[in-house]
Image (cartoon, rainbow, N blue to C red):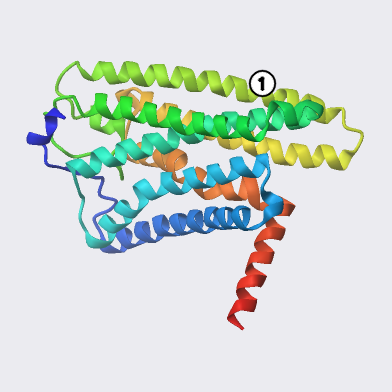
Amino acid sequence: MSNSSSVSEFLLLAFAAMWEQKLLHFALFLGIYLAALLGNGLILTAVACDHRLHTRMYFFLLNLALLDLGCISTTVPKATANALWDTRAISYQGCVAQVLFFVFFIGAEYSLFTVMAYDRYVAICKPLHYGSLLGSRACAQMAAAAWGSGFLNAVLHTATTFSLPLCQGNAVDQFFCEIPQILKLSCSDAYLREVGALVFSFSLAFGSFVFIVVSYVQIFRAVLRMPSEQGRHKAFSTCLPHLAVVSLFLLTAIFAYLNPPSISSPSLDLVVAVLYSLLPPAVNPLIYSMRNKEIKHAVRKLFEYIFLQQK
């Protein structure tokens, strides 16, 4: 990539000038990171160890936990290390890797949200056809397609972004290497190629969002026909948080990547980045899994086994 000779490192956003405030930011980011590690790690372990969870739905939840761990581990460790050691630097190669892996995990996760919405639609609205429409092979293929689409999307945006000449310094106004912040350093109209690629990607993402919303509308219509009030309440309490997380994820990501510079500010960009990059990996385990009785039972058995082994 052409810029490696002119820019050897980037400077990430400095959280605060005072040491006490830096320590507070370090503790906040570390707390979010540890919560995501714990929640997603428990899901991975529970699904892998409990044979009763070797079903289609939990296969997708296992993939979601892997993507959440990858997404948050791409950005937070470097940000917390910089806050702790009072530095802002990240190497050029490190920045390229961060963009590649972050876009990969975030894109694959959104594709997986679409697949999971379809899974729930078939399970609730077409239960008699669930086995034929979503067999083991079909589930594996859909999961592989989600990971593959995320990787292709990441390669496209990373190659386009880092092929641009940079002449506006090397200070990135974000706690990680975020594409919109790197585009601000570009010194030519060539950055419009990446903006066009972003518009195309978000157009596809919006199409997926429409599919997700339509799927949940059909689910809600089926739920309203349920005779059991308890069943309706359980379905709504499960599906509405799913839809809220996907909506928050997409809207904040669109704002972060396509907002006009006139309404952009470091503090606003930081809040939006936290909402779409840190919040979902931390809360997804609670919304998608930890409210599930089977997952809670598997986690309880796991802790009991660990406790007995230590006696």
Q: Quadrant of residue 64?
A: top right
Image quadrant assignment for residue 180: top left
In the image, taking residue 173 as reference, residue 309 lies left or right, namely right
Query: Image point 44% across, 21% down: which residue?
Result: 202
Q: Residue at x 11, y 41 (%)?
A: 8
Pinpoint residue 178: horizontal percent, then vertical percent. Answer: 31, 36
On the picture, is 159 further left or further right than 73? left
Q: Return the residue nearer the eye: 304 or 274.
A: 304
**Identity of the residue furthest to the right in this view:** 227
Is residue 182 among what the camera can see? yes
Q: Is residue 299 left or right of residue 168?
A: right
Residue 74 lies, with reference to residue 190, above or below; the image says: below
Whole-percent x, y for residue 232 in the image: 82, 37
Counting from the top left corner in percent of width and height, residue 242 is at 63, 37
The answer to whether one can see residue 247 in this image is no
- Residue placed most toward the observer, 124 or 188: 124
Q: Label 1 is placed on what type of residue? A: Val
Of the 4 image quadrants, the one containing the N terminus is top left
The residue that disc 1 covers is 214
Locate residue 92, reporting x and y percent: 18, 41
